[in-house]
Amino acid sequence: MNVMEHLVLGKDHRGQGYGTRAIKILFIYAFLERRLNKFNDYVLEGNEGSIQMMKKLGCVQEGIRREVIYKTEDSKI
């Protein structure tokens, strides 16, 4: 099973624990309810807030994705 998580908080709400609580709820569901054994997260380079949040939640960086291109149906790549 693949699950994609995307969390966006407005600047006024960052640093108040909302993201951490949301991801904790996601982890409880993923690991206890769905019995997943691994969670993959992708954080954009330079997003130090998200990097620190994931570390605080016990996540460990296993690698770095390089030269990744994201495209949509409208992309001309």
Image: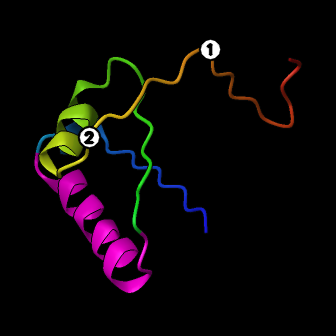
What numbered label is drawn on residue 4? none
Rendered position, 66 above or below 38: above
Residue tagged by mark 1?
67
| Residue drawn at (18%, 41%) of the image | 55
User: Percent position (x, y) of residue 22?
Assistant: 27, 62
| Residue drawn at (17%, 35%) of the image | 52
Rendered position, 37 above or below 16: below
- Kind of residue indicated by mark 2: Val
Residue tagged by mark 2?
60
SS for callout 1: loop
Residue 17 covered by magenta stretch: yes
Lower sequence index among marks 1 and 2: 2
The way the protein has been coloured in the rendering is rainbow
Rendered position, 19 above or below 2: above
Residue 15 covered by magenta stretch: no
| Residue drawn at (86%, 37%) of the image | 73
User: For mark 1, does the 10 Å Cα neighbourhood hold few (<14), some (14 to 19), or many (20 or more) residues?
Assistant: few
Q: Nearer the viewer, residue 19 or 3?
A: 3
- Kind of residue indicated by mark 1: Glu
Q: CA distance from mark 1 to mark 2?
A: 21 Å
Rendered-image quadrant of the C terminus = top right
User: Percent position (x, y) of residue 29?
Assistant: 35, 77
Q: Say how many tags the image has.
A: 2
Q: Quadrant of residue 46?
A: top left
SS for callout 2: loop
User: Percent position (x, y) of residue 32?
Assistant: 32, 81
Q: Main secondary structure of the magenta part?
A: helix
Q: Viewed as shown, does residue 63 lie left or right of 27?
A: right
Q: Give the magenta part as a residue range.
A: 16-36
User: Percent position (x, y) of residue 24?
Assistant: 23, 64
